[in-house]
Amino acid sequence: MRIAVAGGTGVVGGHVVEAGRAAGHEVVVLARSAGADVITGVGLSDALQGVDAVIDVTNTTTLSAAKAVAFFETATRNLLAAEEAAGVGHHVALSIVGIDGIDSSYYAGKLAQERAVAAGTVPFTIARAAQFHEFLGQLLSGMSGPIAVMPKLLMRPVAAREVGAHLVRVASGAAAGRARDLVGPRDEVLLDLARRQLAFDGVRRLVLGVRLPGAYGKGLASGSLRGDADALQGAITFDEWLRTEDHVRGE
């Protein structure tokens, strides 16, 4: 099977590419560095020739709802148009568990992406996953100084490696509209994870928790991002992940 991975050079994308090749699939990476740009559409049609399924794990870093919506709608529109022209039979979009009631900030973009995928003509599966173990390191690296401030967030984090393998399994099957959600093995609090990771890494840094205002902050603190009882569960806990090469390499 020939699978294209949009955003295949990112953290999750790298694991998708690895999992796809390990499963015996031919994997095509869609990224600007590979000559395919989801925002401009340049190079997509040529890259998708002969592709059976596309896994979209593209991402943008913003808390602006307008910017997030613009990015995900544009990327999705360009991907679906190129897929339709190339005869791609399955579009898989990675989204986030429990965001239905948080149509604001970054999550507004992911919900817009889901709506755009569902409105398209390419058979699709939306695969939602919980926040990744790697998410914490990304937050910490974006803050300078001796103090790190973490929003109140109840979560059930999962390893990006397990998300990558899950997406390949979804893409290998028939389009289903929605796949079962994927969450991690344990309920966690973001503030606790930050302190544990810094301690593991031997970094002395004060971590403070805050509750963000508005619908976004309420959603983060509500526990909805932990998913439902019928979700699939990954096996790698956060503390186990800290001891893996994925964390050591900063992935």
Image: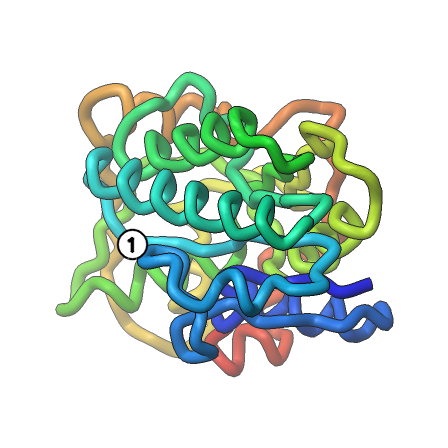
Give above or below for 138 relative to 112. Answer: below
Q: Amino acid at mark 1?
A: Thr
Camera-nearest residue between 160 and 57: 57
- Residue at x-position 68% and y-position 49%: 87
134 relative position to 217: left or right: right
Give above or below for 68 relative to 143. Answer: above
Q: Where does label 1 land, which residue?
A: 61
- Residue at x-position 53% and y-position 33%: 117
127 relative position to 74: left or right: right
Outermost residue toward the left in this view? 145
- Residue 8, by quadrant, is bottom right
Residue 25 on image: x %, y %: 81, 69
239 relative position to 194: left or right: right
Q: Secondary structure at mark 1?
A: loop
- The quadrant of the picture occupied by the N terminus is bottom right
Q: How is the image coloured?
A: rainbow
- Residue at x-position 23% and y-position 60%: 206
167 relative position to 198: left or right: right
Q: Is residue 243 visible?
A: yes
Q: Is residue 194 visible?
A: no
Give above or below for 72 relative to 139. Answer: above
Residue 62 on image: x %, y %: 24, 48
